[in-house]
Image: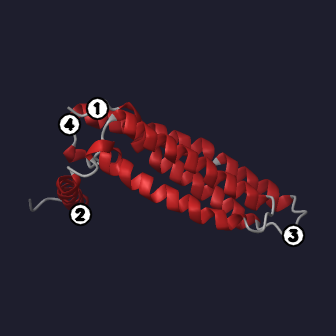
Amino acid sequence: MPDATLIDRYQTYRAKRFLKHERAYANSLPSWRTQRRRRLLVIGLAVTFAFMFGVSVLCAFGIGRAPLLWLPACALFFPMWLMLQIVSGRQGDAPHATLDEYELAQRNSARSIGLTVTQYLMLVPVGYLIIASVNTVNPEVDIAYAGGLMALSVLLIGGCTPAMILGWTRPDPE
């Protein structure tokens, strides 16, 4: 394909890499591939996100040891996120060329919802940063750190939303 652009070549590379990883993990975690188990992972991620956001709020109130709670939140998040990605076949971020029309429509719908969730939830840390930076009364509160944790929580929620939606709604594999 001599007329292929850099983007076309990258998409081809991405599709090949995706299919390679899909084959490598196709038989991993077979007991977690049921809809019921995927839903448990989605609920676990939602609880973890609530915990992460709670940690950021504790930081906003100046609780000294609150940032240490971010470590257990990450220790819970990463394994559950990886498991959900494996058992749902990474359909939430799959390249266009690897999906059929129905899967593509589902993925695009889930991505649209994820973007909307991100945009609306991002108003919370932005509002906090604007208001707290103008009305600083407690010098022990690290406004930027707390706002950064809030923003990171929101970005994780929005980024994981498509896979969570697909993991929740897809029926059991045959």
The quarter of the rendered structure image containing the N terminus is bottom left
The type of residue carrying mark 4 is Asp
Query: Split into 4 quadrants, where in the image is the C terminus?
Result: top left
Q: Name the residue under label 2.
A: 6
Location of mark 1 (residue): 172
Q: Is residue 139 above or below residue 58?
A: below
Residue 122 in the figure: left or right of residue 19: right
Residue sitting at x 29%, y 48%: 94
Q: Tell me the SS state at disc 1.
A: loop
Label 1, label 4: how many angstroms apart (C-alpha)?
18 Å
Give the residue type that dot 1 points to.
Asp
Question: What distance separates the C-alpha of mark 3 from that of mark 4?
Answer: 55 Å
Q: How far apart are marks 1 and 3 (CA)?
A: 53 Å
Marked residue nearer the N-terminal end (2 or 3): 2
Relative horizontal placement of residue 167, taking residue 153 as reference (left or right): left
Q: Is residue 116 above or below residue 151?
A: above
Q: Do the residues labelled 1 and 3 touch (CB within 8 Å)?
A: no
Please state which of the two labelled residues, at mark 3 or mark 4, is closer to the viewer: 3
Residue 137's spot in the image, x, y percent? 91, 63
Q: How far apart are marks 2 and 1 (CA)?
A: 38 Å
Instruction: Say which label, 2 or 1, has the lower sequence index.
Output: 2
In this view of the protein, which residue sits in the foreground, 112 or 45?
A: 45
Q: Indicate the secondary structure of the residue bearing disc 4.
A: loop
Write down the residue under mark 3.
Answer: 139
Depth check: give the residue in front, 156 or 73: 73
**Which residue is depicted at the point 71% across and 66% down?**
144
| Real-space CA distance between mark 2 and mark 3, rounded to the nearest whole angstrom | 50 Å
Is 151 or 96 nearer to us in this picture? 151
Q: Residues within 10 Å of mark 2 (few under 14, many from 20)?
A: few
Task: Tell me which label, 1 or 4, sits earlier in the chain.
Answer: 4
Determine whether 147 is above or below 139 in the image.
above
Callout 3: few (<14), some (14-19), or many (20+) C-alpha neighbours within 10 Å? few
